Structures are given as structure tokens and as C-alpha cells.
Image (cartoon, rainbow, N blue to C red):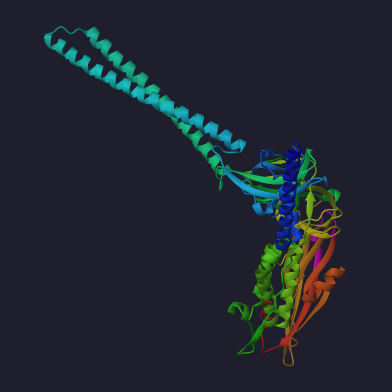
Amino acid sequence: MICVYSCKRYMLSRQLQNICKDRFMAFAVLERGLSMRKLAILAILLVAPAAGIGQQPIVSPGTISRVTVYRGQALVTRQIEAELPAGVADLVIPDLPARVLPESIYAQADDQKVKVLSVRYRQQAVEQETRQEVRQLDEQIEQLRRQIKHLTANREHLQTQWRLFEGLKDFTIAAEKSDLGRGVLTFEPIKGLVGLIEQKGKEYLEQRLQMDDTMEDLNKKLDLLQRQRTELVADQSRTERQALVTINSPGGKVRLDLNYLVAGASWQPQYNLRAEPRTSTVDIEYIAVVNQTSGEDWKGVSLSLSTAEPSMVATPPELKPLLVGLTPGGQVAAQSVSSSIQAPWPAAAVAQQARQIAVRKSEVAGKGMAATDELNRLALENQLLDLNLSGGVAQQFQKELEQVARREGVSVTYDLPGRLNLPSRSDQQIVSIALISAKADFVLIACPLLTDYVYLQADILNASQTILLPGPAAIFRSGQFVGRGDLPLVTIGEQFTAGFGIDSQVQVTRELQDKVTRTQGGNRIDTFTYRLAVNNYKDISVGLRVLDRLPYTEDQAVRIELGRSDPPLSTDEQYVLTQRKKGILRWDLQLAPKTTGTKATVITYSYVMEYDRNMRIEPRSQEQTR
């Protein structure tokens, strides 16, 4: 017994030595071939179970809670709640829209203990449409097709019966002829036969017409449903789109947000301006026209409208050097530059080119490093225009760029109150942004040199906390629609001008009262006298701004001077600084009520023009003066 026990102890001791030896050799190999970082990764992989092994992914579609609509895209946020086991688990969010941008999908959790390890996008083919409204249309279409099929079968059966009846009718007529030939035919059988043929023919005709009408109605309904379905599933296929989120959590109920961009969503500002001249107010109804064809319905969501560019790029673009060289003719050249850019630019094309560059720049600016080449190309065009254009035109180009950036580069976001519903459909949808009641200074504008009509105009102060973006406006005065106009960009605290249609109760006429020409030395001197008459048919006093003009010149060989003016010209500071020096004449009048005919308000003015008598006056365009 002692020998056996000693042998067992010896064998056990040898096994332990072999195990220790094997482990020592294994660790020696690992120490020689692997770094500590690799050892750590290997240990984690050996100890930690892989996510999803032996587990089914948890499916939770969540609900859409927030949407921010940009110009061309929308950022959608889904709130997801799910019961997850402790550790690593996969969460599937199904029913993503057809126009989702897969590279934009990301998830985040409020609880710091919940870690989002990865977010993946995948597609799966399905037998039926995943959207409820499409499935409902499919059911209705299938029901209509069954009805059409049954109706077609009934119509064929009716035709078969009629053919059998016609065969019986022909047989009966042949039998009657035989009886007539034998002299045994009487009147009553003939009468009954004719009545039966007439009755059956009428019944067949009525049934056939009724079936044809029903068939036509069913085909119209089917065509309508098919067109509705085509609009809903445009550019879509029977594919379910899913986000697969891998999460490491302590377990229990987990809340997270899944965010993604979708195409097919945009908005444009639009306004209704409702003027009340008697109370000196204008109500500004600021609305948005939203196009939503993303492929999913937004029900009960918090909606925001933004003019910003949805950018998810962390790396800025790289500014590349601009290599230039010389070319014959004194022109500046650069590599990869088109001849159209190097050619001299007319001033009329400057504004259009500035808009094109600014718009294209705004489209790609949010792509960061990925748009480096495009942004450098646009910068190249901009700098080459500086190099090639004359000083005045180059400065004008830069001013145009600044104005375009001011109009189109303003980044604002409007958070709309309440919860809104915006289904995915092809027609435009209207949502309200703000209702602003603004103070306004109303004045009538008359320019008889251009038109006989007198227009009502208002200077409106935006005292709200809302920036008004450029957009079309429907104009109302005292509840009546008077026309359409355009609203400029109006910042907070800024004043803007809007027109409110024609006022036919004020009329203005203009006439050349006198013209005297004389010669002094080698010069010709012309003296012009004009008379403007204003008739006010209103029973109230109104303000009127009358505009006229005299020629102006930058040519030192021509002298143009305003003579007398009764009443005097306006002393408005902005007018004096900007328009007066270019020959624009302005009178600010207050018209008494019922001043017409001999009581009409009269404006008279004169001016003198002196120039070489061997020359003649001709108009010059703005481009010619540059």
C-alpha cells in the first residue's frame, strides 16, 4: 500500500511539473512574440463573451421625437427604450426610411454607464411593404382587383347566357317557320316569342350597361390608388432598413437617441403681411413651406427649421498653395484655370458670378476635409477675379460676395412650439413660425415720371426677437388682398420697407411747363420748368412722398444745377446722403383732405443744363461710367 501511495504521489508531482513547464514555455513564447497590448487584447477576448453569441438581438423601433429640417435634408431623432441584459448586447432599430443617409447614423445615451460601442446600418429584403400606409393601399388595391376579376367573370357568364338564348331563339323561329309552312301557326305563339325576345334583350342590355359602368368606376378607383402608391414609394423598394447598435450597459431599461439624416426634406420662408393703416400696424405672419418626402411620417414631433448646413465632419479643409505664372499680354495665369475666368469681365456679370461662387461654396463648406479640392477651386476663382478685374470692378465683386453672404449665409434655427405632424407626401405642407405685430409708418409714394399710380408704402420696424429671412410675401391691406412682393433679410431691430398696393384716391400729374434755350459764348444753356399737381380725394389728411429726377453727370464739360423748388426738397438724412447727389428729387408732403382741382397741391421746380453747343446730350449706362 505504501508503494502504491508513493507511486501516485510521484506521478502527481510529475504532472504538476509538466503543467508548470508547459505554462512557462507558453508565456516565454508570448513574451518573445507578443507585446503587452496584444496580451491584454487576447486576455479580454478569452474572458469576455462575444455580443450576440447565443443571444437574439433585441428589436425596438422607438418613436420619432425631434426633427430639424434643413435646406435639403432633415436630422431625425428617435427615442429608444429597451430592456437589455447586463453586458454587451445588440439592439436593432427597424423601419428606417428609404431616404436615410447611412453614413449619418449615430446613437448616444444620456446615462454615462451605458456605452454605445458601435452603430451599423443594414438592409433586409421583405415580402411586404414595411410602411403602414403602403400596406393599407396594397390591401385596397387587392380588394379592387378581386372585384374587377369577379365582375369580369360575371360579364363573361352573361354573354354566354345570351349566346345560349340567341341559339334557342333561332331554333324557335325555325320551328315557327315550319309550322307556318304546314299552316298550323297561330298569332299567340308569334306574339309570345316576340315579347320574350324583347324582354330578354332589354334585360341583357341593362345588365351589361350596369356592369360596364361598375367596371369603369372600379378601374378609376384602382388607377387612383395605384398613383397614390407610386407617389408614396417613389425611388423605394421592398427593403427594410435597420440600425444595429451594440451597447454595453449594466442591464435593465436603457434609453438612448438614434439620430440620422434623411434626404427629401426642405423648407422655404413665406409671409403674409396684413396692414392696417388706420392703426399704423402691420401683422407679419411668418410661415414655412415644408417639403417632406423622406419616406417616414413625423407624428407628434418637436420641429425645428434651420438654415444651417448639417455637418458631421470634424476635420477642416486644407488650404493649398496657389501657383501662378506669366503669360503673354500681361495676363495673370494659374494652373488649371479656364480661359473664361482669365478673360476680362463685364461689370454686369460680376453680381451673377458672385452669387454662383457663394452658393456653391455654401453647398460644400460643411463637408470639411472631403471638400478640400472643391473649396480650393472656388477660392482660386475668387482670387483670380481679384487679379484680373480692374480695381473698381474687383471691389464691386467683393461687395457682391458680402451681400450674398449676408442674405444667404445667415444661420438661424426656429424652434416651433407644440407637437406637429408632417406626413411624407409629395405636396407642400405649411407650418407657422411666428406672428409678429409691428409698428409701421405709412406713406403714399408717387413717381409720375414712371407711372400715374400712387402706391401705399410702410416703413416697418422688426422689434421682435425673430430674424426674418428673405422670401415671398402675400400683401393684404385692411383685409383685402392687393398683390405679392418679396421680403428682404430683416434682422432683429432692423427696419424694412414694404408696399401695400395702389391707392386710387390720390392722383398725381406731371407736365413740362416751360423750356428756354439760349446761347452764351460757345455753350448752350437750357432752362426747364416742371409742374406737378397732386389731387387728394380722401376725407382725411395723408402723407405723400413725391419722387422725380433731373439728369446728373460725372462729365466736367456738362453743368447741371437745380434752380428753385417750391416746396423745398426733403431734408431726410438718408436721402440727402445717397440719392440727392445723383439727381433724384424728393418732396415729403402732408396733403389736406379733399384737395382737388383748383385746391390741388402743386409742386414746381426748375433746373439749368449747360454744355458745348456743338455737342448733344445722350444717356449713359451705369457700366459706361465705370
279 versus 218 height, above or below = below
355 versus 76 height, above or below = below
Q: Is residue 525 visible in the rendered structure shown here?
A: yes
610 versus 65 height, above or below = below
Q: Which residues are magenta?
A: 590-603
Q: Is residue 395 left or right of residue 204?
A: right
- Splitting the image into 4 quarters, where does residue 71 fall? bottom right
The image quadrant where one finds the N terminus is top right
Give the x, y percent position of residue 520: 75, 90
Give the x, y percent position of residue 64: 72, 42
The image quadrant where one finds the C terminus is bottom right
Pick the front one: 611 or 234: 234
Q: Please say whether residue 592 is one of the residues in the magenta stretch.
A: yes
169 versus 382 height, above or below = above
Give the x, y percent position of residue 148: 45, 29
Q: Please say whether residue 347 is one of the residues in the magenta stretch.
A: no
Pick the front one: 194 or 71: 71
